[in-house]
Amino acid sequence: MSEDNKKNYGADQIQALEGMEHVRMRPSMYIGDVGTRGLHHLVYEVVDNSIDEALAGHCDNIEVIINENNSVTVTDDGRGIPVDIHKKEGVSALQVVMTKIGAGGKFDKDSYKVSGGLHGVGVSCVNALSDHLKATVYRDGKIYEQEYERGKAMYPVREVGTTDKRGTVITFLPDRSIFQQTVEYNYVTLANRLRELSFLNKGIRIVLIDRRVKDEDGNVIEEVFQSEEGLKEFIRFLDDTRSPIIADVISMEGEKNDIPVEVAMIYNDSYSENLHSYVNNINTHEGGTHLSGFRRGLTTTLKKYADASGLLDKLKFDISGDDFREGLTAIISVKVQEPQFEGQTKTKLGNREVTSAVSQAVSTMLEDYLEENPADAKTIVQKVILAATARHAARKAREMVQRKTVMSGGGLPGKLSDCSETDPTQCEVFLVEGDSAGGTAKMGRDRNFQAILPLRGKILNVEKAMQHKVFENEEIRNIYTALGVTIGTEEDSKALNLDKLRYHKVVIMCDADIDGSHIATLILTFFFRYMRELVEMGYIYIATPPLYLLKKGAKKRYAWSNKERDEINEEFGGSAAIQRYKGLGEMNADQLWDTTMNPEFRTLRQVTIDSLPEADRIFSMLMGDEVPPRREFIEKNAIYANIDA
């Protein structure tokens, strides 16, 4: 601070921002970020209002339209936002709801017993971050409307007609000055969330329409999401690419200790545990008390049944909680009046009373099921015994990994070319496909902060491997050792200790061809299944090496797609010499540095998870045993693969 500024620092320098101004100045505090995730969060906030109307029993239909200009229209047939004059504010209640942070009926327990939305900022935040927003209300036989620019009302709420409908229509256009990265909505991202909401709130009809794209007949894309069985259908959807080992989904729905609880689960022949938990429709990917209650109820009840069955008599070692959850896909959904969140991202439920409610509900459900389905019960216990046997073998394999880590003094992998910097926030490691490309990368890198770990061929497909096979795999052991993390506790055999993580950027660098994509997917599957924390913390990236080098005389340009190649060739008069890179090894060290490794010019794609259930389903489909779903996915998405190439 300069001397002049120090002298002038007084009351006039203190900014007292009103709510809407504060949202615009600090948008990330309200919606997480101003990238694609925050952009889509705007839609979720508006839809959450409609879902809350449905939870209160006043709404059956919700429609979401992506308009041609990337504005979004959300319509519901609920009661309609009140429009009468608010006594305290002196203006229409609609205007209060749209322009005051924290205003709404959700704070009145008589209006809404529970409500969705994680941050509680609601539609007023959407209004503040929109270039333009229009609210239309159908209520008491009349139509009302009000428009806003960047959160400020353009005119008082006005009556514009009569109607026999009821409900609310919100149309908003995100502000480009806030969302500078993009204001283009991703249809698949929105579809995944709306499908999820339809499963979590059975009976509600949700329609998604995209007016930006039309088919050969000139029709817009339209999809309807509606579930009659709720979580049971959700489980079948998630496990569509796995083979069940029991006849049907085990499920329950009811109230325990005044807390509505829904649970659905099934056992399959995989080796992964996939538990998804929700509070008031929000995916709590960090878990919390409801997940603890589920685990307690599951373990206690199954252990009691297994002991009584006599099937465990010959087992020479104890069974842990992990063993009861191998090959299990489960969804736990609770509705809590006043949820208390904790954890770094505020997605971990902290309400203690929920633990016993869920535990009791799960115990009752399982006791009834096991008694009524003895054949399935025996199959589940046999699966648990197999998991315990494999875990016993995996413990030895994990110990081998631990002995080779830096912490235990075993040293780094011989193939790792480490960097000189020791601050992990400044360090990055490239997982490179093959020794040849690894050698080039070692010569081209900046040794100060860039480390290179060559991987030999395709690593193990962890989606189809038992845990001890994963930990016995040399390439996977090298990754653990190079990163410096330790793994496994008795409570959770995949738990990571990240205290000694050596790099905060882990870059997957593979050839830009089919084999390279397959290897990258194998590595991503490993990180998703065994090091998900690194993905969630934003530490995993994918490098984007160029596909082509174009030369004409002294001029040279790189191209990352066929379209870019053709455009550059046209710039060069259509007579450029074009070299197609079939692999990283075909580049020299300088070329690899210039195009793929130099932070000043490279493009890294950060790996993020928008929806855990959807990511789980996609990895299972791509890397599992079932061929038909994988073929259908590839055929459906082939056009995007061609564009990327």
Image (spheres, grey):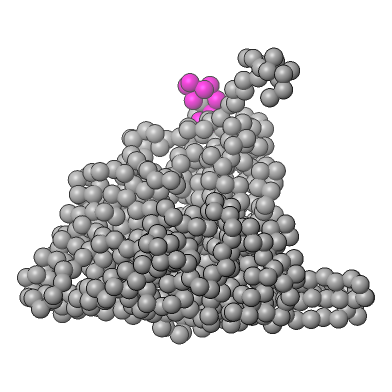
Q: Residue 394 falls in which quadrant of the image?
A: bottom left
Question: Which quadrant does the C terminus fall into?
Answer: bottom right
Q: Nearer the viewer, residue 215 or 514?
A: 514
Main SS, magenta region, reads loop
| Relative horizontal placement of residue 255, taking residue 68 as reference (left or right) | left
Q: Residue 232 falls in which quadrant of the image?
A: bottom left
Q: Nearer the viewer, residue 147 or 424?
A: 424
Q: Give the magenta range.
A: 86-95
Image height of 48 relative to 262, above or below: above
Question: Which quadrant does the N terminus fall into?
Answer: top right
Q: Nearer the viewer, residue 359 or 198?
A: 359
Image height of 222 relative to 588, above or below: above
Image height of 551 relative to 541, above or below: below
What x and y, as percent, mark residue 517? 58, 77
Q: Residue at x 21, y 65 (%)?
A: 320
Q: Residue at x 48, y 32 (%)?
A: 103
What x and y, as percent, mark residue 421? 58, 54
In reply to whether residue 91 is colored magenta, the answer given is yes
Q: Nearer the viewer, residue 311 or 441?
A: 441
Can residue 101 be spotted in the picture? yes
What x and y, as percent, mark residue 444? 69, 68
Q: Residue at x 74, y 75 (%)?
A: 588
